[in-house]
Amino acid sequence: MTEPDFTVGIEEEYLLVDRDTRDLPEAAPQAVHEKCAQALGERVTEEFLSAQIEVGTSVCQTIDDARAQLANMRGTISDIAQQQGLGLVAAATHPFADWKRQSSTAKDRYDVLSQEMQAVARRLLTCGMHVHVGIGDDDLRITIMNQLRYFLPHILALSTSSPFWQGRNTGLHSYRLTVFDSMPRSGMPPEFSGWSHYRHEVDMLKRTKVLSDETKIWWDIRPHPKFPTIEIRICDVCTSLDDALAIASLCACVTRMLFRLHRRNIGWRRYSQFLLSENRWRAQRYGIADSLIDFGKGELVAFPDLIEEVIDLTQKDAAALGCEADIRHLRTILETGTSAQRQLDVYRHAIDSGCDENQALRDVVDELIRETSACASQPAKQTA
């Protein structure tokens, strides 16, 4: 069986923040989007809300290539935003912005989406990271996707960056999913027996005009409708570029590990959507700060122990894909915390220091701007 290339592509969504108020502008200056498009071309696009902006790498042969592109794009957009009195924030939700005050981008696709989904779409003031892993064979994509569902809660927990929503500490580490799960065709996808089964289900919705195209399937993971990739969509956008590249590396390495098993006629044991969804909720609620269920053992296992197992399982794959240093950075996330944990630390420190809640949330925004901007032009990690 020919081994896929396991190329990687990464999409990230960011927020543009007014540096004076730390709030989102109700309508971001069009000049920001125009200048970003001039500097970055088709790698940058407008998102559903005008205060959002999206970037995407090209098809990358290595994680180092993806790092260079993302660092350049974050740095370029941050510089352009600063010229317009704005800051760039890589977080899945804004700590206190009100979605009802945001204006949507004037595009036919977004107008249709707003009309179809009404308030469900209009409150999508959330930002995610999507990781594409290249697999050319249609049936193989479905086979690997079915098994990858087991690891989605682990991936989500590492990426969590949305503990606040509309000025409240939600108690969740990824509130973004609470918002996004109100969309149809979202959440954990069902299991499919093969490509023909997947096509049959999707084509049924297209024939009935319920679904215009597959880009409106918003599952946590999906076969991309245009590219020969598995697209892992469950992640919050990461404030730290190092965290983002480590998680993208994990996605690629687990995909390759599952392929190696498949080539030997071995498959990762599959579990019901009911059980997988329980781990998804635990990752959404606690991030990396608690435990997930190890279904093989039938018990809760501390998250660091689970990640050590995954690192061990994917050693060969990290070496083959040249991302060993990025995989090792997963341990750094466990030590220093996710963006959600760091945001909560800033918030609690401000409250303990006598700040009121509004100032504490503004401090969180300041730290998000600082950390997002600090990621620009980072050198590649050394493998040795």
Image (cartoon, helix red, strand yellow):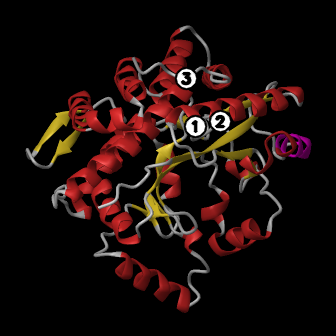
Dot 2 corresponds to which residue? 69
Dot 1 corresponds to which residue? 66
On residue 380, which mark appears? 3
Q: Quadrant of residue 19?
A: top right
Residue at 57 percent across and 30 percent down: it is: 239
Residue 170 appears in view: yes
Q: Whole-percent x and y of residue 384?
A: 39, 17
Q: Whole-percent x and y of residue 246?
A: 44, 32
* Front residue of this view, candidates 233 and 113: 233
Q: Amino acid at mark 1?
A: Ala
* Magenta segment includes 127: no
Q: Is residue 175 left or right of residue 282?
A: right
Q: Is residue 29 left or right of residue 64?
A: right
Q: Residues within 10 Å of mark 2 (few under 14, many from 20)?
A: many
Q: Quadrant of the N terminus?
A: bottom left
Q: Quadrant of residue 103?
A: bottom right
The part of the chain drawn in magenta is 29-36
SS at mark 1? helix
Q: Is residue 170 above or below residue 228?
A: above
Tell me whether circle 1 and circle 2 mark residues in contact (CB < 8 Å): yes
Q: Whole-percent x and y of residue 244?
A: 51, 34
Q: Amino acid at mark 3?
A: Ala
Q: Amino acid at mark 2?
A: Gln
